[in-house]
Amino acid sequence: MSTGTDGDPSPSGTPEPAADDTEQTPADDVTQTPADEAPQPAKPPRTGTTTARERAERQRDEKLESIREQVESGSLVIRKMTDEERERYPARDEPPKRPRSR
C-alpha cells in the first residue's frame, strides 16, 4: 500500500478524517421544510384582468338587469305567444351537442 505525502496510508494523498470527526448529514440539519411552514392565506382575487367567461357573465348580468328595468318601467312587455304565433314560429330543435375538444 502506498502512503500519502504526509505519511498517511491513503491512496489519494489526502488524510482521512479521524474517528471523532463527523460530517453533518442532511438529517442533522434543522431547517424548515415546506410541510413545516404555516399554511399560506388564499390569494386575493385578481383585479384588472378577467377571463372571457367572467366578461361574458358580467355582460349577461348587465343585459338581464336592463331587461328587468325595462319591464318595471313598462317600456318592455313580456307576454305569452298566441296560438297563431305558435304555429308560425314553432319551437326550435336543440342543436346536437358537439364533443368537447381537449
Image (cartoon, grey):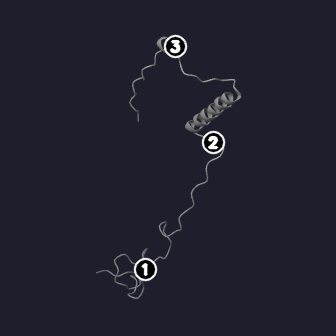
Label 1 secondary element: loop
Front label number (1 vs 3): 3
Calculate the distance from the C-alpha at mark 2 to the C-alpha at mark 3: 45 Å
Q: Which amino acid does label 3 sit on?
A: Glu
Query: Residue 18 placed where, x, y %?
Result: 39, 86
| Residue behind mark 3 | 85
Quadrant of res 25:
bottom left
Work out whether residue 12 or residue 100 is closer to the camera in this orientation and state it: 100
Labels 2 and 1: the sequence-earlier one: 1
Residue neighbourhood size for the residue with mark 1, other residues' Cα within 10 Å, grouped as few (<14), some (14–19), many (≥20): few
Residue at the spot x=53%, y=18% of the render?
81
**Residue 54's spot in the image, x, y percent?**
58, 39
Instruction: Judge by depth and name the residue closer to the eye, 22 or 53.
Output: 53
Amino acid type of disc 2? Thr
Answer with left or right where residue 32 lies relative to residue 68: left
The residue at which mark 1 appears reads as 23
The disc, 1 or 3, on the residue closer to the chain's N-terminal end is: 1
> Which residue in the protein does label 2 denote?
49
